Amino acid sequence: MLEFHLKRTGMLVVISAPSGGGKSTILKTLLNEDPTLSYSISATTRTPRENEVDGRDYHFLSTERFKKYIDEDAFYEWAIVHNNYYGTLRKEVDAKLGEGRDVILDIDVQGSLALKADRPESVLIFVLPPSIATLERRLRSRGLDDEEAMQLRLTNARSELRRSPEYDFVIVNRKLDETISKIRTIIESERHRSTRLTLKDALGEVLMTSAALD
């Protein structure tokens, strides 16, 4: 009896949320619970915060080196956020995808939409706070910003929220466990999208490829 087998390529999953929107906790939980997910570390020119480690939390680069990477087209996307440069290194993402792993990215709206233009098969998920008031309360409770920086974050958050309809999926983060469950469901469903799969039988004959479905 000939049996069918599905082979899947790795996919890119982007999760965006305003600062203070719970994104870090969501990502940490997803990565801890699903070993098939791999996190791609962003590069940035901002100063490391306390307990942040280069190569674990971010690739911390000088502005000069970051601009050199831009000139070399080393980024899938890059943007200036809160007066600092952030970017996604092609080499790091491609290495993980080449291993057949799903790569999860934590990037802002500007970078996410640039990545989507470059890689249309990417899955973009936007996590909304319950309200701007809730977001402001979360940001102030962290105690990381002075008032000027706080107002900049809130202004940027409002701008990002207006672009959330450009994402594939939008979730309001009212209860963290429910939000994580919904994102898990999205990821699992996308793994079974026909355009990501190659179908073979036991003899190794290719019966269907993603190209044939375009």
Image (cartoon, rainbow, N blue to C red):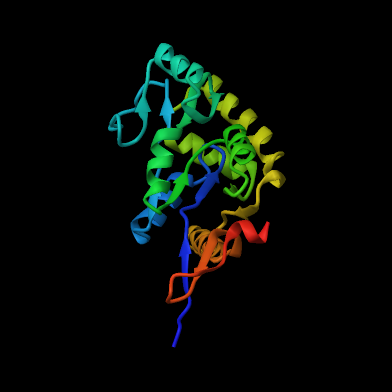
Which residue of the protein is positioned furthest toward the top in this rendering?
64
Left or right relative to 44: residue 212: right
Left or right relative to 192: residue 7: left
Image quadrant in which the C terminus is located: bottom right
Question: Residue at horizontal 38%, vertical 46%?
Answer: 96
Q: Position of residue 161 (x, y in %)?
A: 67, 40
Question: Residue at horizontal 53%, vertical 63%?
Answer: 197
Question: Residue at horizontal 56%, vertical 54%?
Answer: 173
Q: Which of 136 and 10 is in front in this view?
A: 10
Q: Position of residue 46 (x, y in %)?
A: 42, 21
Question: Residue at horizontal 65%, vertical 51%?
Answer: 168
Q: Which of 27 and 201 is in front in this view?
A: 201
Q: How many labels does the image show?
A: 0
Q: In this view, does 17 lie above or below 7?
A: above
Q: Is residue 101 above or below residue 184?
A: above
Image quadrant in which the N terminus is located: bottom left
Q: In this view, does 15 lie above or below 209?
A: above
Q: Position of residue 74 (x, y in %)?
A: 46, 26
Res 69 → quadrant: top left
